Amino acid sequence: MAKKHDRGRAGRNRTLVVTKEEQIRLSGKLMRITSDQKPGRFDIIDKTILGDLFSIIDCIPDEMADLIVIDPPYNLTKDYNGLRFKSLGNAEYLEYLRSWFPKVVAKLKVCGSLYICGDWRCTAALQQVMEENLTVLNRITWQREKGRGALSNWKNGMEDIWFGVKNQKSYYFDVNAVKMKRKVLAPYRENGSPKDWEETDSGNFRLTFPSNFWDDITVPYWSMPENTDHPTQKPEKLIARLILASCPPNGLVFDPFLGSGTTSVVAKKLGRRFCGIEMNEEYAIWAEKRLEKAEADRSIQGFADGVFWERNSLSFQKKSEKQKQ
């Protein structure tokens, strides 16, 4: 799929490129189902399904997913490679969510978890539809350092992720799998020894449990190997934190708005099964190429040695890895 995106790229630009030959081959790997089909759970595991969510959601088996990650169209007018979503009034957007969200929730296991992404314009509607179908446990806010400033308003530098479960007395959550490693700038000692931090040759660091505010996320850009031309691509590091916390090893992660495939790719890298639905064939093909690349490279930028590192710490990560080797 070498087209306008590929022309004029800088030499160090690592944005995903798909050739015409790859397009044909990868298109053949996509799963296509019709409204009269009923594939079983094992038929859709590790598949990218090409289709319209509204047409095929009833074909997907109920209670199959340990975790559902949803990154739906925000309430903004935006073009998704020729498919245009037009902003709606608040009430209309809520009805749009209600038209598909309960059906997606039905795909979640009784002990499963669900995350849904949004910005400040649609977060109230997301909270309402979540509360109508699940028990809401938290709202995560993450800092997205990307985009131009606004001359007549505050720059939008935050997005939300709502976290809910079917059964608040029984759900998977592994907080130890999502610890953060931060550099200690003012180390405190007790009896001459480090207190709650570690002294290493590569620096002084502290392992901490994450809160519901994440300021260590970098939005994909041209020099990152995970980058694609998708207009609203989520970072692998962001999705990795959701999957490690809320999906057991070998569990199934479902994404009904797969886009360029980040949820499936991260699930594969972290030893989980996956299934995603995407209606745009080009995006679905990007997902398949990224899944193939994940066979040889399971690294996730910002996640190394079993912990999440703060932003701009790559040199420390490399130093730590060399010392272990």
Image (cartoon, helix red, strand yellow):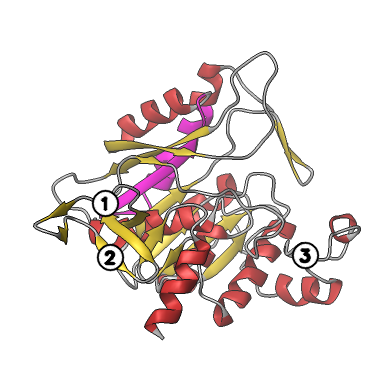
Q: Measuring 31% from the left and 30% from the top, which residue is drawn there? A: 131
Query: Would you say residue 61 is visible in this rendering?
Result: no
- Residue indicated by mark 1: 187
- The C terminus: image quadrant: bottom left
* Quarter where residue 144 is shown: top right
Q: Of the residues tagged 3 and 1, which is closer to the observer?
A: 1
The vertical placement of 268 against 79, above or below, is below
- The N terminus: image quadrant: bottom right
**Going by the image, does 70 lie left or right of 50?**
left
Residue 266 on the magenta span:
no
Gap between marks 3 and 1 measured at Cα: 38 Å
Q: Of the residues tagged 3 and 2, which is closer to the observer?
A: 2
- Residue indicated by mark 2: 199
Residue 103 on the magenta span:
yes
Element type at marker 3? loop
* Quarter where residue 241 is shown: bottom left
**Going by the image, does 103 lie left or right of 248?**
right
Element type at marker 1? loop
